[in-house]
Image (cartoon, rainbow, N blue to C red):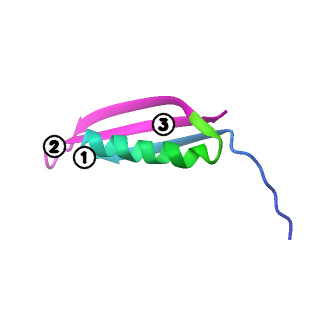
Amino acid sequence: MEFKLERIHDKIEFFEANDLKTLERKIDEQIENNKALLLEVHSVTHHVAFHPETGRPLYSAVVHFKAK
């Protein structure tokens, strides 16, 4: 059996939450997790939409991580 260790250079993650504070917490947790992979935030894109059934806002974000 052969093991290959390759470094991750780019990683894109998607997040979704019902409130902005929860969304921010999820992103912060993943930033800490990705520090172990030597990845840092390259860009963040966020969006707010209203859920058609509940009428409540739905917050989403895309975070692009890149190698240091």
Q: What residue type is labelled 1?
A: Asn
> Residue 65 appears at what percent x and percent y?
57, 36
- 10 Å crowding of disc 2: few (<14), some (14-19), many (20+): few
Find numbered disc 1 in the image and state the secondary structure of the residue it sits on.
loop
Find numbered disc 2 in the image and state the secondary structure of the residue it sits on.
loop
Give the residue number, with chain letter if any, for mark 3: 63
Which residue lies most toward the right here?
2
Which residue lies most toward the bottom here?
1
| Quadrant of the rendering where the C terminus is positioned | top right
| Quadrant of the rendering where the N terminus is positioned | bottom right
For this view, does 54 lie left or right of residue 1?
left
Decide which of 50, 38 is in the foreground and name it.
38
> Residue 60 appears at what percent x and percent y?
34, 40
Labels 1 and 3 touching (C-beta < 8 A) = no
Taking the spot 58% from the left edge, 35% from the top edge, the residue there is 40
Give the residue number, with chain letter if any, for mark 2: 56
* Residue 50 painted magenta: yes
- 10 Å crowding of disc 1: few (<14), some (14-19), many (20+): some
From which residue to which does the magenta span run?
A: 41-68
From the image, state whether disc 3 or disc 2 is nearer to you. 3
First along the sequence among labels 3 and 2: 2
Find numbered disc 3 in the image and state the secondary structure of the residue it sits on.
strand
| Numbered label attached to residue 18 | 1
Taking the spot 33% from the left edge, 32% from the top edge, the residue there is 47
